[in-house]
Image (tube, grey):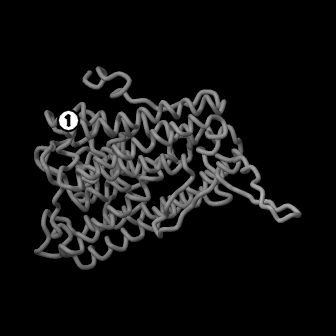
Amino acid sequence: MSRLFMGTTALGVALSLPALAATQSEVLSTYADIAAAGYEDSAIAARGLHEAIEALIETPSPQALTAARAAWLAARVPYQQTEVFRFGNAIVDDWEGQVNAWPLDEGLIDYVDAAYGGASDENGLKALNVVANTSFDLSGQTIDAGAITPDLLSGTLHEAGGNEANVATGYHAIEFLLWGQDLNGTDHGAGDRPWTDYAAGDACTNGNCDRRAEYLEAASELLVSDLDWMAAQWAPGGAAREAVTEDEAAGISAILTGMGSLSYGEQAGERMRLGLMLNDPEEEHDCFSDNTHNSHYYDGLGVQNVYHGQYVRIDGSMVEGPSLADLTAQADPALDTEMQAKLATTMRALGRIKLAAEAGTSYDQMLARGNEAGEALIMGGVDGLIAQTRTIERITAALDLGDVSIEGSDSLDQPSAVFE
C-alpha cells in the first residue's frame, strides 16, 4: 500500500508521515470488489454475445456468424480473469461447472464427424445429438426435449447421468454451436461451422436449423442469468462477499488458495502440461475456436490482478485498493519483490504464446509432437506458473496462515500416471 500523507507544522514545513499499513479487512474488501466487477463485466459481455446470437438467428448470414463469434471471444476476456476466484471460494467452485466446464462430448449437443464415434461404455449419451432428437431416454425415463429451454439444458442435460463429459451449458457449449468441431488435429485451423447451419428452409445445412438456433439461444440466455447471479453474490451483502470477509485469516487463505490452485494444478497442469504430454488438441481449453492462447493469458492476468489489487474493467475504469502485495511487503519486502518478478515472468511467457498464436502459429500446432519451438513456448508458461506457486507458498508462511491447500495435477506430480 503506497499512501503518502503530508502534515504541516506551525512553521508551514511539510512533513512526510508514514504510510498507513494495509489491513486484512481492507485487502479482502478489494478482493471482493474485483470479483464483483469481473463478474459484472462478464455478464455485460455475455449480454453482448446474446444479442449477437439473436441477430444471427433472426437473419443468418456469414457476417452475422462472424459477429457472434467475435462477441464470444470478447466475452471470454473478463470471464477468464475471474477464474482465480474459483478455488478457495466454494460458492464459485460449486457453480463454475455450469458456466465453464470442459472438455465436453459435443455429440451430446449436435451432429459430429463420423470419426467421433457413438455411445461408449464411459458415456452412453456421447452421441445423443439433442438438436436432432425431440425425446431421449435417460436412466429409464423418456425425456421430452421438444422445446429446448434453459431449464432442459441445466436441469436435465448438463452432466446427465452424472457424467462430467456431458457438458450442455456454458461458454464451451456455445463455442461448439458457433464454430463446430475443430477437425484439423495439430494443423492450423479452428472449427468451421457454416452459417447455413442456422438458415431457414431449403438453405439449412445439416438439418434441424431451427432447433440448433433454439439451443444456442437458450444456452446464451442461461449464461447471462448465471453470470448475473454470481455478480450479485459478490456485491455488498452478497453471500460470496460475506463468506470471504467474515473470517479475515480464512479469507486471506482463500485468496492464496485461488492464486496457487489456478496457477499450479489447473493452468500449469490440466490446461497446459497435460495437453503437451499427450500432444492432444482436444485438451485445449477453447478447442473449437482456437482461442486457448487468450484463455491462458487472461487466466494468468487474473492471478496478477488479485495480487496487486487492481482490475481494469471493460469500460477502461480501474478497480483498485489495498492488496495482498501490501500485506506481503509489510511482512517481507524481499518476498513481495520476488512475487512481483515471478508474476511478470509468467505474464511474459503467456504473452509470448499469445503473440505467436496471433502471428499464425496456433496453439494446436504448438502441441504437435516434435514441435520443439511450440513445446518451449508452452513450457515457458508452465515453468513460470509453477515458480510463482512456490512463492505463493512462501507468502502463506510469511503471513502465518498455516497450510493452504493448492490443487495438484498428475501431469506435474505423477507424470507416469497420465499414461496408465
**Residue at 69% across, 47% down:** 22
Percent position of residue 57, x then y: 27, 74
Compared with 239, 215 (above or below) is below
Compared with 121, 362 (above or below) is below
Query: Which quadrant holds residue 419?
Result: top left
Within-10-Å neighbours for mark 1: few <14, some 14–19, many 20+: many
Query: Which quadrant holds residue 377?
Result: top left
Q: Is residue 269 in view?
A: no
Decide which of 347, 250 is in the foreground and name it: 347
In what quadrant of the picture does the C terminus appear?
A: top left
Decide which of 145, 359 is in the foreground and name it: 359
**Residue at 14% across, 44% down:** 185
Residue lying farthest right?
A: 10
Compared with 48, 260 (above or below) is above
Compared with 337, 228 (above or below) is below
Query: Which quadrant holds residue 219?
Result: bottom left
Q: How many marks?
A: 1
Q: Is residue 297 in view?
A: yes
- Residue at image mark 1: 279
**Residue at 46% across, 50% down:** 302
**Residue at 57% across, 52% down:** 309
Amino acid type, label 1: Asn
Secondary structure type for disc 1: loop
Percent position of residue 265, x then y: 41, 34
Percent position of residue 101, x then y: 38, 47
Percent position of residue 354, x then y: 29, 51
